[in-house]
Amino acid sequence: MKACYFCKGEVVEKRIQHVHQWGGKIVLFEDVPAEVCQQCGETYFSPEVLEKMDEVTMGEEKPKATISVPIFSLAEAVTA
């Protein structure tokens, strides 16, 4: 059993969805192998998975689908 670096909870292997941001692009990956803390949700990726996500994000590979994402600003709604 592996323990989370932050909360010491149990970390288990899972396949997850992950939003990846690199070089001004945002990409949603599905079926990503990861280790996830069962207590706090912290996610850990292997170096190989991170490298592959960067490669796909910056490459010319066609996505299997494209989605629209709404963008909201809280600049005027939240005052300091």
Image (spheres, rainbow, N blue to C red):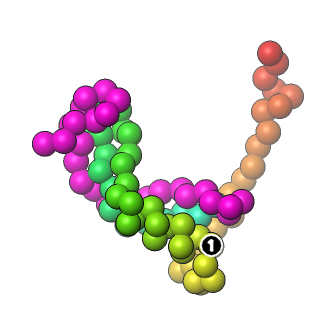
Q: Dot 1: what SS?
A: helix
Q: Is residue 27 magenta?
A: no
**Residue at (46, 66) in percent of width and height:** 51
Give the residue at mark 1: 58
The residue most toward the right is: 76
**Quarter-wise, where is residue 57 in the image?**
bottom right
**Residue at (22, 36) in percent of width and height:** 3
**Quarter-wise, where is residue 34 in the image?**
bottom left
Q: Is residue 42 left or right of residue 80?
A: left
Disc 1 marks which amino acid? Answer: Met
Magenta residue span: 1-25
* Residue 73 or residue 19, whichever sits in front: 19
Q: Is residue 67 left or right of residue 33?
A: right
Return the x and y of residue 17 as percentages of the image width and height.
44, 59
Count of number-bearing discs? 1
**Residue at (86, 28) in percent of width and height:** 76
Q: Is residue 3 magenta?
A: yes
Figure quadrant of the C terminus: top right
Residue 32 in sight from this viewpoint: no
**Quarter-wise, where is residue 74 in the image?**
top right
Q: Is residue 7 above or below residue 80?
A: below
The residue most toward the left is: 1
